[in-house]
Image (cartoon, grey):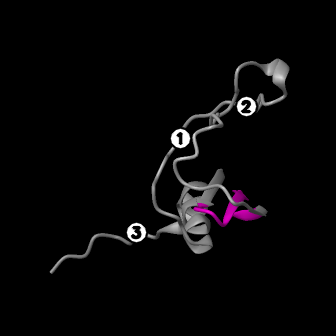
Amino acid sequence: MITVMYDEGSRYLGYKNSTEVFNESTSDTEGDDSNDAYIGDGTGSANGRNIGAIIDEVRISNINRAADWVTTEYNSMTNTTTFINIGSEQYQ
């Protein structure tokens, strides 16, 4: 699971499998559309941006998430049998 967050005018945060892999300062501001955003493969593999993998889900949100949220999302997808434990049905 790859997660990238942007904190306007401050930093970019990146996580891979719930582990922070980059935290870069930036002076970018919202509305600066001088650069395109690419998911997976930009305009072709010749430009070096080819992810070389299959993307099965993309989520885009306008809310910055805490590191704990990223970890919880990762755990809920990778540890489905231990993330939640559903007991047997109870009768009254």
Task: Give the number of the mark in front: 1 or 2.
Answer: 1
Q: Nearer the viewer, residue 92 or 32?
A: 32
Q: Is residue 2 above or below residue 53?
A: below
Residue 73 sits in quarter: bottom right
**The residue stretch that appears in magenta:** 7-20
Is 69 or 85 nearer to us in this picture?
69
Mark 1 in CB contact with mark 3 (< 8 angstroms):
no
The amino acid sitting under disc 2 is Ala
Nearer-N-terminus badge (1/2): 2
Q: Which residue is located at x 66 percent, y 37 percent?
A: 35
User: Residue 14 location in percent, x, y?
Assistant: 71, 58
Residue 53 placement (x, y as % from top left): 73, 31
Specify few, some or many for label 2: CA neighbours under 10 Å numbering under 14, 14-19, or 20 or more: few
Q: Nearer the viewer, residue 55 or 35?
A: 35
Q: What is the tally of numbered marks visible in this picture?
A: 3
Instruction: Residue at 47%, 68% (x, y): give it.
Output: 84
Residue 58 - label: 1
Question: What residue appears at the point 57 percent right and 72 percent down from the top-left corner?
Answer: 66
Vertical position of residue 34 compared to residue 67: above or below: above
In which quadrant of the rendered view does residue 22 lie?
bottom right
Q: Nearer the viewer, mark 1 or mark 3?
A: 1
Tell me: 50 left or right of 61: right
Pointer 1 local density, CA inside 10 Å: few below 14, some 14–19, many at least 20:
few
Q: Which residue is mark 3?
A: 86
